[in-house]
Image (cartoon, helix red, strand yellow):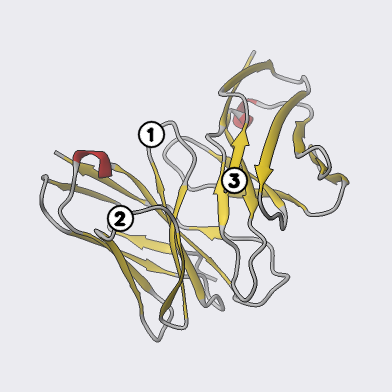
Amino acid sequence: DAGVTQSPTHLIKTRGQQVTLRCSPKSGHDTVSWYQQALGQGPQFIFQYYEEEERQRGNFPDRFSGHQFPNYSSELNVNALLLGDSALYLCASTPYRQGVVEQFFGPGTRLTVL
Amino acid sequence: GQNIDQPTEMTATEGAIVQINCTYQTSGFNGLFWYQQHAGEAPTFLSYNVLDGLEEKGRFSSFLSRSKGYSYLLLKELQMKDSASYLCAVRALLTGTASKLTFGTGTRLQVTL
């Protein structure tokens, strides 16, 4: 059973560019959440997707957008990259139904903005 | 909003016991999680508490007091491989959605010989 997968593993961009990160949830999971983790910090919630819609959003600007596909995979897009966007981007999946506890995290994408 | 506090760093000796504390303030509460994160890797689930009391799982135990907004993670018989960051996270009380977690900054634990 494959867990949560993310691609690419590492990415280097320059300021002002745009980036797309990808996530495939664990088998049987239909809800995907994205987190940003700066060095030495805990993950910060960006947004959550279910049924191809953004359901919850954290305190991130509109430069951060996402998408969920019918197969539950998801993309995170960041426009007009800033140096401060350099971080580990984590995808987590879970089944939608209430009472399910654990979020499973993928290995992350390390984004460096120069 | 939610605010979560935990110590930045701790050091303990192999074979010893260490307790990592977490305090939280939240407008809604639907469970507290502990995750372990080794450097450069994804967080992995350790424990979940939604009711007051102690949950034990092998060498790891987690305690919750909702009235005090307080939790701790207890690690027994420390091993070198336990050197990692330990993240405390609170799940918001939301309806109709799956978990949204708010994380603390993490406690970096160094286990020494």
Which numbered circle lies on residue A61? Answer: 2
Category of crowding for the residue at label 1, using alpha-carbon neighbours closer than 10 angstroms: few (below 14), some (14–19), many (at least 20): few
**Which chain does tag 1 point to?**
A
Say which quarter of the image contains residue A84.
top left
The answer to whether B109 appears left or right of A49 in the picture is right
Determine whether label 1 and label 3 are within 8 Å by CB: no
| Numbered disc total | 3
Which residue occupies the foreground of this view, A49 or B67? B67
Mark 1 or mark 3, whichever is nearer to me: 3
Q: What residue does disc 1 label?
A: A39
Which x, y percent locates residue A35? 43, 53
Q: Position of residue B3 (x, y in %)?
A: 59, 40
Residue at image coords 59%, 72%: B97
- Asked if badge 1 and badge 3 are on a common chain, one would say no
Quarter of the image for residue A14 reads top left
Q: Name which of mark 2 and mark 1 comes first in the sequence.
A: 1
